[in-house]
Image (cartoon, rainbow, N blue to C red):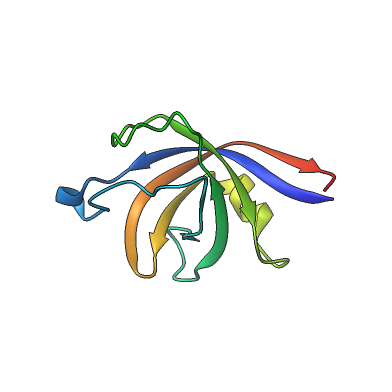
Amino acid sequence: METIAKIKIKWLSAMNGGRKILPSGRMYKPTLRFEDSNDLWSVALFLDDNMDGDFKDNDIVTVAFISDSFPYKKLKELKLFDITEGPLKVAEGILIDMLDVDI
């Protein structure tokens, strides 16, 4: 059993400190940080083919958690988090749903 989640992403534009272009490819491996902590958690985002390179507020993607010690309870409670590349915040995320799946 593995826990995955559906999240909504609000990408930050380069003018707001984010990426100049959106990630390409189907998998993107940033880090996730909660507002009340400096801890970074490795995640894998599975991007849709229909992402057209625009910095939209409504990209919905699947996220897998790489660490077995990821704080799932905190994610369920807070629902909001930052998506980072190292110390650089590139997007904001909101939890839509969490699922346990067989792999």
Q: Residue at x 19, y 51 (%)?
A: 14
Q: Residue at x 85, y 50 (%)?
A: 1
Identify whether 82 is placed above or below 99: below
Q: Residue at x 33, y 54 (%)?
A: 90
Q: Quadrant of residue 85?
A: bottom left
Would residue 22 appear left or right of 13 to someone viewing this image? right
In the rendering, at what x and y percent does residue 42 appear?
55, 64
Viewer-proximal residue among 102 and 53: 53
Find the residue positioned furthest to the left.
15
In the rendering, at what x and y percent does residue 57 appear?
35, 32
Q: Quadrant of residue 86?
A: bottom left
In the rendering, at what x and y percent does residue 21 appear?
27, 48
Identify whether 75 is placed above or below 99: below
Q: Residue at x 64, y 42 (%)?
A: 5
- Looking at the image, how many numbered discs can be counted on the residues? 0
Would residue 48 appear left or right of 35 to someone viewing this image? right
In the rendering, at what x and y percent does residue 59 appear?
43, 33
